[in-house]
Amino acid sequence: MAATPAPTAPTPTGPAPSSASRSAPSRTSGPGGTGGPPALRAAALVVALVCLLPLAVVLTKAFESGAAEAFSLVWRPRVGELFRNTMALVVLTGTLCTVLGVGAAWLVERTALPGAAFWRVAFVAPLAVPAFVNSFAWSALVPGFEGLEGAVVVTTLSYFPFVFLPVAALLRSVDPGLEEASRALGYGPWRTAVRVGLAQVRPALLGGVLLVSLHLLAEYGALEMLRYPTFTTAILDQFEVAFDSRAGSVLASVLMALAATFLTLELLARGRARHVRVGSGAARRAPRARLGRSMPLALLAVGALAALALGVPAWSIGTWLSRGSEAMTSTDLGRPLWSTVGLGLVAALVTTAATLPAAWLVARSHSRVAVALERVTYLASSLPGVVVALALITLTIGVARPLYQTTFALVLAYVVLFIPRAMVATRSAVSAVPPELTDAARALGDPPMRAFLRVQVPLMLRGTLAGTALVFVAVSTELTATLLLAPTGTETLATAFWDASASLDYAAAAPYAAALVALSAPLTYLLLRGTTEEARP
């Protein structure tokens, strides 16, 4: 049947196409342009330079005596031992997190496992327990729990949700028609799982493993408590014991090179292939596989994983809380709690404000300059907290002495470390607000600032506050930068817990551990809610 020609007359509900195309450049610029007001670009550039500052300071300090001496510090047996320890931990923990994260995600999202909603929460909840609190729980429960074996167990149970979350979200939203087409072409279930299923979850899996690897490079508290030396623990030892910031900077440079290597390997592993679909796909969930006789074994597996990841820290903390009633009465939770909340709120608000210029430019102009400024913040945040703290100590002592061990320097470290957590949420919130609404407010007579406050802020507030909350939770559990940069007399829940646990006073440390878990719990809710909503068909 012949198609009916579309009418060519313009409709009365909008401007003609020619006028729309003429007005577009005034709001945004093309991909190759710079885009955005000059003041906004300048503010984003300042934030990017601040984020790059720790990297530049560490490299300058490491090579200030010449490249030959720096390389002589690198080519030492001790550095080789630290490298082997770090790589062994990354390889073993990364492998176990992959197996547990993908296996748990498949059981929860693609099989008829009873209680899928409960297991989904249980496998995200370990993120509410900081790794150093987890190591405290295992050390208090199992005497002599240390070394590589202990480090692998604790870090795996703490970080496997980083793999579970993205893989489960993707499995929940994947188009079942692709697998059905593969089966119709004669491929069996295992070949379909490898050729279709694995290809679809590969980007999420690689991103999760990258997050695990970067967290392992930055981890200090759990590994120090388990007496497993890595680059991060050695850097802090160089500063606190030997007061040798140059040797620490050399080790930090090696750690930065490892982080850059992991980022590059993840990019290469992703390749140039793109896994996208045109259209909405099949508007239904993928059919769940029946487990049959394997059901008891699957329930035993997921129950054991949840018990090890959540049950052990909960039982250990609860036991020491019940045993240490006298210690609890003498424990002053008020001061570290208020310090943690105060630093978290200030750092979260400052970090969110710092993300606005680059997030606005990326969402509105899509220019290469805006994207480059955004990526710089991601690169800086891949540095461990000890590296950022070491750089700021070197900078404040040498250039800005009045800022040494001040709240300003500590908040600046938090901004550098956690700005991507606010950046992603803020960029999404800005993108979700149509710019035409602001144009309409301006046309009705509102000045730019009034239009922004009346139209943009209410619509982007929810997404922006989600990023602010994520930064707050990250700040409340941060340990290494806080240990090095906190002003004299400032004590947070993390540092108070660390002081008590370092002296093996588990009864005194337990209240701080419980408070840390209580403050971290919103992270579980936000992550689970966000991934669940994004994955809905």
Image (tube, rainbow, N blue to C red):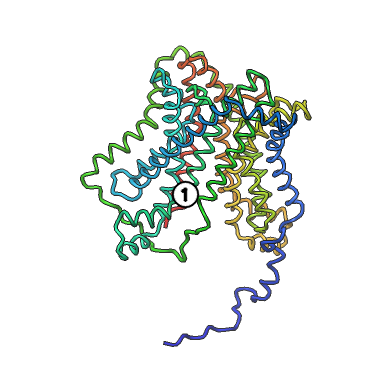
In the image, what residue occupies the spot 41% across and 37% down?
Answer: 96
Give the image location of residue 506, x and y in percent: 46, 17
Pointer 1: residues within 10 angstroms few (<14), some, or many (20+)? many
Q: Residue furthest bottom?
A: 2
Is residue 377 positioned above or below 521 on the image?
A: below
Give the image location of residue 213, x and y in percent: 51, 38
Give the image location of residue 252, x and y in percent: 63, 32
Is residue 81 positioned above or below 332 on the image?
A: below
Q: Residue type at mark 1?
A: Ala
Residue holding disc 1: 204
Question: Which of 335/48 is in front?
Answer: 48
Question: Which of 335/174 is in front?
Answer: 174
Question: Which of 16/309 is in front?
Answer: 309
In the image, what residue occupies the spot 60% across and 48% down?
Answer: 426
| Residue 408 shows in the view | no
Quadrant in which residue 349 is drawn: top right
Give the image location of residue 402, x and y in percent: 77, 26
Left or right relative to 153: residue 51: right
